[in-house]
Image (cartoon, grey):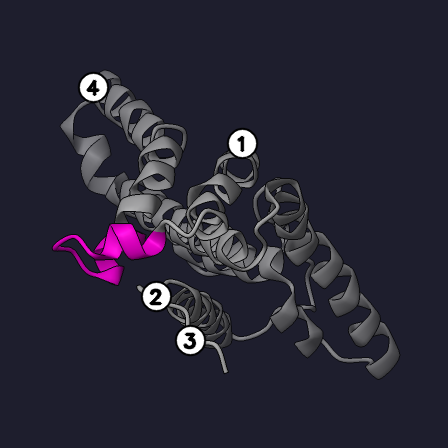
Amino acid sequence: MAFLLAAFVGPGQVSPDLANNALPLYLARPFSRAEYVLGKMSVLLILMSAMTWIPGLLLFALQAYLEGGGWIVHNIGIASALFLGSWIWILLISLLALALSAWVKWKPMAGALLFGVFFVAAGFAGVINAILRTRWGHLMNISHLIGSVWVSLFEQPMHRGSGAVFFRVARAEEIPIWCCWLALLAICGLCLHLLGRKIRGAEVVR
């Protein structure tokens, strides 16, 4: 649901300002490009928080109330994993949605590209793994990266073959968790770079 929300709301955050040349007016005010991006991203952060970690922690609090204080001590890792995993997911798809919105001014196309980044890249990763008989193609599969990180947060030891419903990781196809973290950080860094290239107070024409 958070992904569908980002695909629907995200493309409309930056593209109208670029299409109507409104960025010089915004950035002429006393706030920076980083504050502009955070302001646009806050819309997605608030909406997706309301459907991910907030109801999850409320459910955890209800279970803790029904079970008693001892249950919290033994299961506090569930709450921390839920909070951290949700924020990883929220930040990733928020940055992807804003970067695509900045580079693709037509909102329906930007939303479609967000689906393409996940599903087309996952298919391409599967083709690489099948042809080269490797598992490193999963570095291009964002769902696999998120699934590996999520299951590593929730399971000790990491039986990543179980996974979540939408982020299932097949056994014998795991890649090291540190590689998954680096790949996710690289994707977020690339999105920030793309946003920095587009969000400027003036356009330089060569």
Nearer to us: label 4 or label 1: 1
**Mark found first going from the N terminus, 4 or 1:** 1
Mark 1: give few (<14), some (14-19) or many (20+) Cα within 10 Å: few
Nearer to us: label 1 or label 3: 3
Q: SS class of the residue under badge 4?
A: helix
Task: Check disc 4 and give the amino acid type.
Answer: Tyr
Looking at the image, is 34 positioned above or below residue 182?
A: above
Real-space Cα distance between discs 4 and 1?
28 Å
**Mark found first going from the N terminus, 1 or 3:** 1
Q: Pick the residue in front: 161 or 192.
A: 192
Task: Check disc 3 and give the amino acid type.
Answer: Val
Check contact, mark 3 vs mark 2: CB within 8 A: yes
Task: Check disc 2 and give the amino acid type.
Answer: Arg
Q: Is residue 27 magenta?
A: yes
Q: Pick the residue in front: 186 or 72.
A: 186
Instruction: Find the residue positioned furthest to the front.
Output: 205
**Residue beneath disc 3:** 204
Q: Pick the residue in front: 43 or 178.
A: 43
Q: SS class of the residue under badge 2?
A: loop
**Residue beneath disc 4:** 65
**Left or right of 115 on screen, residue 23:** left
**Residue beneath disc 2:** 200
